Amino acid sequence: MLLNRKIWLGTSQEGAVSLLPSMANRHGLIAGATGTGKTVTLQVMAEDFSALGVPVFMADIKGDLSGICKPGEMNDKIAERMANCSLSSLPMQGAPVTFWDVYGEKGHPVRTTVSEMGPLLFARLLQLNDTQSGVVHLIFRIADDEGFLLIDLKDLKAMLAYVGENASRYTLNYGNISKASIGAIQRAIAILEDQGGDQFFGEPALNIADWLCLDESGRGMVNVLAADRLYMKPAMYSTFLLWMLSELHELLPEQGDQELPRMVFFFDEAHLLFDDCPKTLLERIEQTVRLIRSKGVGVYFVTQNPTDIPSGVLSQLSNKVLHALRAFTPQEQKVIRAVADTFRANPAFSTEETLMNLATGEALMSFLQEDGTPSVTQRATVLPPQSSIGAVAEDLRRTFIDTGVYAGKYDAPVDRESAYELLSARFVSAQTPVTQVVQPVPEVQPAPVQSAYQPMVFRVFNPQTGMYEEKSMDNMPAPVQQSQPAVYQQPQVHKPQPQPVAWQQSAQAPAPAEKKSAKKAKEEKGFGQQLLESFARSATTSSGRTLGNQITRSLLGTLGIGKRK
C-alpha cells in the first residue's frame, strides 16, 4: 500500500515503515526461513511498485505468486493482520500481469538466441570446465568471424562439427581445438536438449523492452515467470535470470538516480545463482549488480539465508527485510550474529535475539533514507496484500495469456537461415560424384613363389661302370603355401555325463566267489601231485644256483681273480 507516494511495507511500534521509491534502485534483500512470510512480503512490494508505475519481474517457483492478478478476499487472517498494522481499510485489487514460461505451457514462451546468450553464460548453462569453456569461446569467435548466425542448438551443434572436422585450419589463428573437448560439449548439449533446453533457444527472441510497459491506467506491468518446472533444473534457472540481468545492463541507457526506478527484479531462491559459480562469472555478476543501478534497475534477492549470497554482492544490497532465522547449532548462531551486525542497531531491542524470535509475518526492516544512510532497524509487521494469496485457477491464467498484449507474438517459433542451413548447403555443394572419387583398382596377381633351394650335386656309384658319377637334383619342389581355413570346425569332444558315485569294490579285485573257487581248486589236488610240483620247483632252483656258480668261477678264472697261490 502506498503512503504519501512511499511504499508502506510494515508497521512497527514507532509507526509506518516505508521504502523510498527513489532509493529502490539501490537493490535489496528479503531473507528468512521457510514459512516466515517472504512470499507475502515480495507480493506486497510488487503491488506497490506496480501502483507507482514501475514494471516488475518475479519468478514464481511455487505457483502462489500468480494470485497477484486478481483481487484478494477478506478473511479472518487478513482482518487480524490489518488490526496489527493499524489499517482501517484495505482496498482489494489485482495488478496487471503478463505470464511467461520458458516451456510455453503456463505463459508466453521466452526465447533467446545462442549468440545473445554469449559464451560465458552458455558454458555456465552446460556446466563445462575451463578447457571446454575456452573451446566454446573459440566456437563463438569463429562463428562471428565467418558470418554464421548461432540461433538455436542445432546451429551450435553444426558449428561444433564443422570446426572439429577442420580443426587444423583454425589452430594457428585461434589455438588448439581438441576433438575430445568438442565431444564433451556435444554430450552436454544432448543432456540440455533432454531437459527441454532446446525450447529456450530460437526465434522470435524475447524483446526486453516488452517487460518495460505500463497498462492503460499507468500501472507497471508485473511479469510473472512460471518457474515451477524450470526450478528443477538449477543451472537453467540461474542462467536464465543472469541472462535477463545482463540483457538489461547492455540494452538500457544510463538514467542515474531518479524519482522512480525503471524496473525492479525479484530473484527468488537467489542462492542458485551462486552455487558452483566460476570466479569469472561471479565477478561479472558483482559488476553487473554494481553498474545496473545507474540504469535505473533495482535487484532484490530472495533467499533463506543471507550468507548464501557472496559478500561482494551482499554489500551492495542496501534495503533489507529479514524474517525469522533459525539457529540450532553454534555455527548457525555465529551466522545470525554476523547478519545482525550488518543492521543499524536499535537501542530498544537486541537485533540478534529478535531475529530468532520473530513471528510469522514479522520482519526486521532497514531502508535507505533520503540522505543515503540506512535507517534504524525496526521490528515491524508486514501489511497484507491487496491481491489474492495463492495460485490462480488455470482457466483464469489462460484468459490472461490469450487476451494479453503479447498474445500471438511469441507463440509460433520461426526457423530462419542460420549456421545450420549455411553449413549444410556448403557441405552439399562441395560434394563430388562418387564416380569421380572411387576409381576401379586393377587386380594384382601374386608373383610366383621362387624356390629358395639351389641345385645340389651328388656323387653316385654306378655298378655297371664301377665308377662314381656326379648327378644334380634340379627338380626340387617349391614350398606350397597352405591357406588357413576361414572357419575352423570345432572338433567333437566327448563330455561324459557325471554319474552318481556308489561305494563299490574295484573291478580289478577278485570277487570273494573267485577267491573261494581258487582255494577250493587247490584243496582238490592230490598229495602226490602236490609233492611232485614241490620237487620240480626245488630242482629248478638248485640247478639254477649251481649253473650260476659255475659261470661265476669261470669268469673269475679267466680274469685271474680268486686263484690261490
Image (spheres, helix red, strand yellow):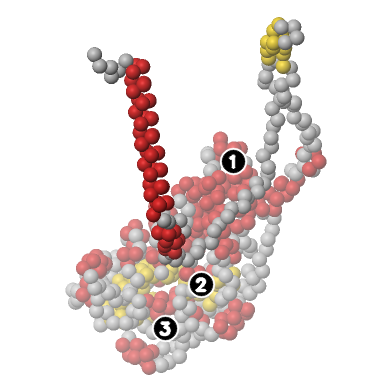
Residue 477 in the image, given as x and y percentages of width and height? 72, 24
Q: Position of residue 394 (x, y in %)?
A: 56, 83
The residue shown at (69%, 27%) is 479
Asked whether residue 289 is in view, the answer is no
Which badge, 2 or 1, comes first in the chain's sequence?
A: 1
Residue 48 quadrant = bottom left
- Please state which amino acid type lies under the numbered disc 2: Arg
Mark 1 or 3, closer to the camera: 1
Q: Is residue 378 left or right of residue 233?
A: left
Q: Which residue is mark 1?
A: 167
The amino acid on which the numbered mark 1 sits, given as a three-letter code, is: Ala
Mark 3 or mark 1, which is nearer the start of the sequence? 1
Closer to us: 439 or 156:
439
Q: Amino acid at mark 3?
A: Pro
Above or below residue 467? Residue 55 is below
- Give the spatial CA distance, label 2 vs label 1: 39 Å
Q: CA distance from mark 1 to mark 3?
A: 59 Å
Q: Which residue is mark 2?
A: 229
Q: Position of residue 453 (x, y in %)?
A: 67, 19
Residue 385, labelled with which disc? 3
Of mark 3 and mark 2, the one earlier in the sequence is 2
**Residue that lies at the very extreme toward the bottom in this rendered image:** 76
